[in-house]
Image: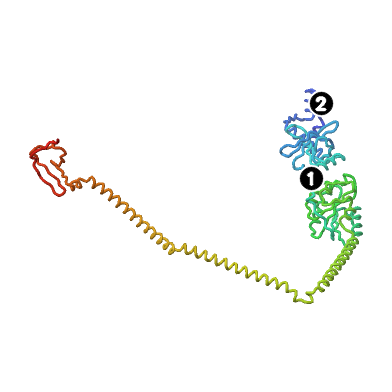
Amino acid sequence: MIQKRQSRLKKPLKQSEGSADLEEHLQADNMQPQVYSVSGLTQDIRAIMEAAFGSVWVEGEISNFRTVASGHSYFVLKDGKAQIRCVLFKGHRAGIKFQPEDGDQVLMFGRISVYDARGEYQIIAESLEPRGLGALQKAYEQLKEKLGKEGLFKDETKKPLPEFPWKIGVVTSSTGAAVRDILNVIRRRNPSVSVIIRPALVQGEGSAKNIAQGIRDLNKIEDVDVIIVGRGGGSLEDLWAFNEEEVARAIFASHTPIVSAVGHEIDFTIADFVADLRAPTPSAAAELTVPVLKDTLEDIRSSTEELISIMRRTVAGYREFLDRMMDRRFFHQPKEIFNPQIQRLDDLQSRMMRSLGQGLTQQQQRLKDKKHRLIQASPKYKIQLSSEKLTGLQNRAVKNIQTLLRFRRERFEGILKNMNAVNPLAILERGYSICSKDEKSIHSSTAINPGDKVKIRLSRGGLDCTVDNIIEEK
C-alpha cells in the first residue's frame, strides 16, 4: 500500500495541465481519479512519514514549553531557520534527568508522527539530553535544589564513620587509577584491613544505575564497616553519573556509612553532598577512612604505659595511706575503736530512756484526758448530770411556786379586804338592812305606797312587811 502510494507520488500532475491534458493522462494510465477524505489523506501521510523516518535524533532549542494538568508536556524545537512541534508524554518524563525550560539546547530522541486533528506533523519525544556545559550545570543545580528541599543533605542524617574499620567496600571501576590508589593507601596504612571491590561503570550510559546497584549490593554484606564510592578526575560529562538522582538516593538509603571520593579536590558532585563524608580524592578517602596501624599501635602503647604509670602511682598512694593508718593507736589497741561507739550507745540509751519517760507521761496524760472525755460522753454520766439538773430545776420550781402562791394569797387577802369593805353584807353586819320591792332595792320612800308589801334583808334572815305609813324626809 505504501509502495503504491509512493509510486503515485512519483508521477504528480503539474498545475499547468488543463482538463484535456488530465483526461489524456488518465486515459494513458487507464486510471480513475482517486478522491481522498481529509482524514484519509492525513492518515496516509502519517503512515508514509512514520515508515520513511521511524525514530530520529534532533538537536535544537526548546521554546514554548508547557505541562498540562494530565502531566503531558508540549513544546517547540527550533533552530535559526525552522521549527517542529513536539510532545513529551507523562510516561517518558520520568526518565528525563533535568527540568526542560525555554531556551535550553537539547538533543531529543523520538519518532515522527502526524496529529490528525490539526493535520500537523510532530515529534513524539522519548528522551531529552542537555547539550553543552551550561545545560549540564543547569540540570545539576535543579537536582541539587530538589534533593536539598527533601532533606538529603542535612547534617543530622549523616552517619559517623567507624574509628577502626576492618572491612571496606569500594564501588568504582576495577581498571581505573582510583581503585589502585585506594588499595595502595589502605595497604600502607593498615594491611590488616580487608577490601571488597564491587566493580561498576563510572562513566557513560547505564553507569548511574550500575553504581547505585553496587551500593545496594555492598549493603547486603553485614560486616562491611564503610563504603567508598568514587572515581578519578574528569570533565563534567565524565563525572555526570555521580550527579544522577538514582545514585544520590542509593547513597541516602544506605545503612552503611558512605565516603564520596569523586574526581579532584575542586570537583563537587551531588554524591558528595548526600554522602556521610566527602573526600577530595580517592586516595584521601582511604586516608580518612583507615587510620595508620603504626600510629594506632603507638597510641595504644603510649596509653598503656600511661595507664600503668597511673596505676602504680595510685597503688603507691594507697600503700602510703595504709602505712599511715597502721601507725595509728587503734590498730595497736583495737578495743579503743569501740570506745566512742560505746559512749555514743550509752548516750543514745539515756536519751531513749528520757524520751520513753516523757512519752509515757504524755501517754498517761492523754489517757486521762480521753478517760475524762469518755466519762463525760457516757450515757450514765449524762443521765446523772440531767438528774441533778432536774432536781435543781424542781427545787427552783417549788420555790417559785411557793413564792407565787404566797404572793397570790397576799394579793387575794388584800382583794378580800377591799371587797369586804364594799360588801353589802358587811354593812348589814353593822346593823343596816336592805328594803326591796319586787326584787328591786328601794332607795327612796317615793318609790312605795302605804299598803305595799316589801322585804327587809337583814344580816341574818329577812322580813316580809306591809307599809303602814310613809315618813317623808325632812
The quadrant of the image that shows the C terminus is top left
> What amino acid type should be assigned to the residue bearing mark 2?
Lys
Which residue does the numbered mark 2 point to in the structure image?
A: 14
Residue 316 position within the rendered picture, expressed as x and y whole percent measured from the top left: 85, 69
Vertical order, 99 against 284 (above or below): above
Vertical order, 81 against 289 (above or below): above
* Label 1–label 2 contact, CB within 8 A: no
Determine the residue positioned at 85% across, 41% down.
137
The quadrant of the image that shows the N terminus is top right
Image colouring: rainbow
- Compared across the picture, whether 388 is left or right of 18 comes to left
| Image depth: mark 1 or mark 2 in front | 1
- Which numbered marker is on residue 77? none
> What amino acid type should be assigned to the residue bearing mark 1?
Gly
Q: Earlier in the sequence, mark 1 or mark 2?
A: 2
Quarter of the figure with residue 4: top right
Secondary element at tag 1: helix
**Closest to the observer: 252 or 358?**
358
Question: Is residue 201 something one can see in this rendering?
Answer: no
Q: CA distance from mark 1 to mark 2?
A: 64 Å
Quarter of the figure with residue 320: bottom right
Secondary element at tag 2: loop
Q: Residues within 10 Å of mark 1 (few under 14, many from 20)?
A: some
Question: Is residue 377 something one can see in this rendering?
Answer: yes
Which residue does the numbered mark 1 point to in the structure image?
A: 148
Residue 404 position within the rendered picture, expressed as x and y whole percent measured from the top left: 33, 53
Vertical order, 265 against 37 (above or below): below
Residue 360 position within the rendered picture, expressed as x and y whole percent measured from the top left: 58, 68
**Closest to the observer: 238 or 327?**
327
- Compared across the picture, whether 396 is left or right of 173 comes to left
Q: Residues within 10 Å of mark 2 (few under 14, many from 20)?
A: few
